[in-house]
Image (cartoon, grey):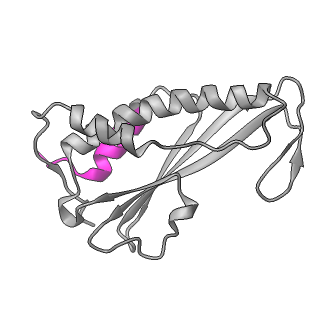
Amino acid sequence: MLKEDLLHFLNENLAALPFNGDLTLDWDKKRHAFVLEITFYIENETGQELTDLDGVLSAEKVISFNDYILLYDQTKGLAGYQPDDFLICLPFDGKKGWTRRHGKAFFNYLKEFLTQGQMQLAAFLADDSKETFELEWSAEVYAAKVAQTDNTEQGNLPYPKF
């Protein structure tokens, strides 16, 4: 039996998430990192005009919103990635990867985060007084999820060999 690695764990758990958007995982082997792209979709029923970060005005019927999470090898650092380009940058421990406990906590929080993000995006679209929309990852809530995750989740999810 093959030992489960971090890549397999991430792909398996992403596929199991109940999310109406898109979740795309990119493994950057050269920089020892994973980039998770999260795409939310929402109907723009009122035809509200929105301006994106590039200044493009749109009143499309379906609005998409993207954000990114970086999982990186803390022994190599951010390897050229810019933290401001990501919702959150979460380290893993080199070849050891993540502990199962961190992996389970990540997906417990991500599931809640995606649900709340979808609701926040809908609320933003319905509120003409708000000018910008930005998702926020709570490091405190995530840390609490790690602390609350069952201690029986032992072992590591090692960085994949290639």
Between 75 and 133, which is closer to the camera in this rendering? 133
Residue 131 falls in which quadrant of the image? top right
What main secondary structure does the magenta stretch of the protein show? helix
Between 48 and 157, which is closer to the camera in this rendering? 48
Please provide percent x and percent y for residue 143.
31, 42
Q: For the magenta stretch, what is the residue range?
A: 1-15
Please provide percent x and percent y for residue 90.
37, 55
Q: Residue at x 30, y 47 (%)?
A: 8
Whether 147 is drawn above or below 32: the answer is above
Q: Residue at x 31, y 66 (%)?
A: 73
Please provide percent x and percent y for residue 60.
86, 37
Residue 9 falls inside the magenta stretch: yes
In the rendered structure, the answer to whether residue 129 lies left or right of residue 67 reads right
In the rendered structure, the answer to whether residue 133 lies left or right of residue 150 reads right
In the rendered structure, the answer to whether residue 26 lies left or right of residue 131 reads left
Residue 106 falls inside the magenta stretch: no
Whether 91 is drawn above or below 23: the answer is below
